[in-house]
């Protein structure tokens, strides 16, 4: 076992109990000597807490890692270590804590404040308290022995490098194992036009074309050379003036102890004929790109024209349908007036004739569309669930069809389209659309009767007929329809003994207005307003989930993750309990 005398003395100083504020002169002298040895040590020493934060370190350690005291106070010892070396060191730390070893030594890379890694040798021991708990770690940091040995042959290498740098016929480019340029000779300056100071420390990718960089060619070539050895090939390079050069190149890996430490690339200057062909190729490429952009612009223009023509066609069809409906209504009105004139003429001719029969009573508005219920499907009781939970369940399943719900003689039809409510009908006269329009003063009784007659003949929705007759505006109709739908659904919340059945299939084609009501939002809005007090155990808060198997979380509507869920897989829940019942978990971002 290798012993470190200075570390042992410092550890004994730390372990020594301090029972008195006043120490003997001899003990004080010994402590001062040890502290001086700690600070003046030729190697870097640091005490680190079990969580990785600094307890104490000397100036040699601070100089070795290259940080100021203020900067070291913001980072831990673990933050300095390269991720790959940190994995190796973690296994050694576990053996040290487990008592398998008394210390360990590792050569690892640490990052300085410039973001560059350098290799050092680190010896680590551990200090335990009297109870056996870990008090701190002792780290001894030294320059690697390989670096010290390399200094002896540095003079010879410098002479060789100086000779290579003066070669003007060939470009010799030296890089490290990551591809960063470490050497640039006179030939590279002549061929590419860059000076040494401009390229040292840069990645060799600046010599490649943009398309080659997108494909990752600079890195892939080094990886291939590291695996297979020396590689010769011809390829494109880019000079400082932007000229593309077709060159012959060879890349050789520099290995030490079987590990690639860098690369040497030898490049031969291109011939004038090749350079000329490259210029022509670049010009041809620019021409092709221009033609491609023009073609793409024409395609976008044609697509816009097709969209505009499709919109005009749809608007024309809608206008023709409205004109056809108005024509039928006007023709019927003319026929009725003609019949009335004929009856008046006959009455004048036959004064003795009995009085005409009383007019037919006005047609009663019927809003319930009487959706047929398939024989195989029977009415269901609500049971333990509330009407609000039943509505949210149908919305969460993104169903399309008609929900019939009855409470005694009162019936309602709620129309769903992909989980959203777009209309509601009832058999209660007080909740008829025209009755609400009359109560708000939007239409008169005469306009109501006329709309009912036209609806009987054309089978159009009454709201649509009132818009055609200019009796109301679309904003007024939307306002009344929205209030009507919300009030009727809120009324359903109180039907505890109701029965219901859902009829899948196509929804009525003649909808009144394009309403799309979020069921969960409406439930929370109405329940919080006092329409139906929520159960004490329930958490009435709308949440959003996904039907995708990849997502198992539910989110608040304001969460960033909720906004990223596509409409096709989006699920809405009236409460957190409903989301939990569906097997989802809370999002960590919005449910901290």
Image (spheres, grey):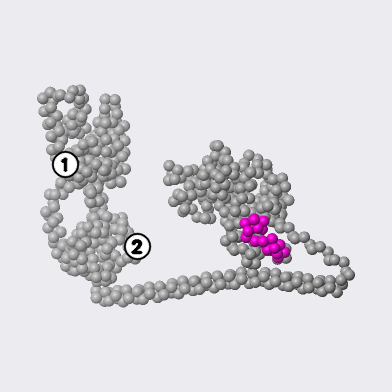
447 part of magenta stretch: yes
569 part of magenta stretch: no
As helix, strand or loop, the secondary structure at mark 2 comes to: helix
Q: From the viewer's perspective, is 505 left or right of 24?
A: right
**At 33% from the left edge and 60% from the top edge, which residue is drawn?**
216
* Residue at the outermost front position: 351
Question: x%, y% of residue 64?
Answer: 18, 44
**At 16% from the left edge and 62% from the top edge, which residue is drawn?**
164
**At 32% from the left edge and 74% from the top edge, which residue is drawn?**
282
Where 332 sits versus 179, above or below?
A: below
Give the labeled residue for mark 1: 60
The region drawn magenta spans 434-454
* Residue at the outermost right position: 352
Question: x%, y% of residue 270?
Answer: 24, 71
Residue situated in front as seen by the camera: 548 or 273: 548
Tell me which numbered mark, 1 or 2, is placed earlier along the sequence. 1
The C terminus: image quadrant: top left
Question: x%, y% of residue 51?
Answer: 30, 37
The N terminus: image quadrant: top left
Q: From the viewer's perspective, is 392 left or right of 325?
A: left
Give the labeled residue for mark 2: 214
Question: x%, y% of residue 243?
Answer: 26, 71
**Residue 96 in view, yes or no:** yes
Residue situated in front as seen by the camera: 181 or 173: 181
For disc 1, the neighbor class at 10 Å (few under 14, some 14 to 19, many from 20) is many
Q: From the viewer's perspective, is 155 left or right of 546?
A: left
**Residue 390 in view, yes or no:** no
């Amino acid at each position: 076992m290798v012993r470190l005398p200075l570390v042992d003395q410092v550890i004994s100083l730390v372990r020594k109990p301090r029972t008195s504020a006043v120490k003997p002169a001899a003990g004080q002298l010994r402590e001062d000597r040890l502290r001086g040895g700690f600070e003046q040590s030729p190697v870097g020493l640091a005490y680190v807490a079990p969580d990785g934060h600094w307890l104490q370190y000397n100036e040699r350690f601070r100089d070795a890692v290259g940080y100021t005291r203020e900067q070291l106070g913001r980072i831990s010892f673990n933050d300095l270590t390269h991720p790959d070396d940190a994995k190796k060191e973690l296994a050694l730390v576990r053996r040290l804590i487990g008592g398998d070893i008394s210390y360990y030594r590792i050569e690892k890379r640490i990052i300085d404040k410039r973001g560059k890694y350098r290799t050092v040798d680190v010896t680590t021991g551990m200090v335990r308290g009297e109870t056996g708990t870990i008090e701190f770690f002792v780290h001894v940091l030294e320059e690697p022995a390989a670096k010290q040995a390399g200094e002896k042959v540095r003079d010879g290498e410098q002479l060789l490098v100086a000779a290579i740098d003066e070669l003007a016929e060939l470009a010799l480019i030296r890089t490290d194992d990551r591809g960063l340029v470490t050497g640039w000779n006179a030939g590279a300056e002549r061929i590419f036009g860059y000076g040494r100071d401009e390229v040292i420390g840069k990645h060799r990718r600046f010599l490649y074309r943009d398309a080659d960089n997108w494909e990752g060619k600079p890195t892939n070539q080094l990886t291939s050379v590291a695996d297979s050895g020396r590689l010769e090939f011809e390829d494109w390079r880019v000079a400082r003036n932007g000229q593309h050069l077709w060159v012959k190149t060879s890349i050789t890996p520099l290995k030490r102890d079987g590990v690639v430490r860098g690369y040497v690339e030898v490049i031969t200057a291109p011939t004038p004929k090749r350079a000329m062909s490259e210029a022509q190729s670049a010009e041809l490429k620019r021409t092709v790109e221009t033609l491609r952009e023009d073609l793409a612009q024409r395609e976008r223009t044609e697509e816009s024209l097709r969209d505009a023509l499709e919109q005009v066609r749809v608007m024309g069809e809608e206008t023709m349908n409205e004109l056809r409906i108005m024509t039928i209504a006007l023709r019927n009105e003319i026929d009725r007036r003609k019949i009335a004139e004929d009856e008046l003429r006959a009455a004048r001719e036959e004064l003795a004739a009995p009085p005409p029969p009383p007019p037919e009573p006005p047609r009663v508005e019927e809003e319930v569309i009487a959706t047929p219920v398939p024989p195989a499907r029977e009415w269901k009781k609500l049971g333990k669930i509330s009407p609000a939970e039943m509505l949210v369940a149908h919305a969460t399943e993104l169903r399309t069809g008609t929900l019939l719900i009855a409470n005694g003689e009162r019936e309602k039809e709620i129309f769903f389209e992909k989980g959203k409510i777009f209309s509601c009908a009832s058999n209660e006269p007080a909740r008829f659309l025209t009755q609400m329009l009359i109560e708000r003063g939007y239409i008169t009784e005469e306009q109501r009767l006329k709309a009912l007659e036209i609806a009987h003949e054309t089978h159009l929705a009454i709201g649509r007929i009132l818009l055609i007759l200019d009796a109301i505006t679309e904003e007024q109709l939307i306002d009344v329809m929205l209030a009507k739908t919300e009030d009727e659904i809120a009324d359903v919340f109180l039907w505890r003994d109701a029965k219901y059945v859902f009829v899948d299939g196509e929804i009525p084609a003649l909808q009144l207005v394009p309403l799309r009501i979020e069921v969960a939002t409406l439930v929370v809005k109405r329940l919080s307003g006092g329409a139906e007090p929520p159960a004490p155990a329930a958490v009435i808060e709308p949440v959003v989930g996904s039907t995708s198997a990849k997502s198992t979380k539910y989110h608040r509507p304001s969460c960033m993750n909720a906004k990223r869920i596509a409409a096709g897989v989006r699920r809405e829940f009236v409460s957190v309990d409903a989301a939990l019942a569906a097997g989802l978990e809370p999002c960590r971002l919005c449910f901290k």
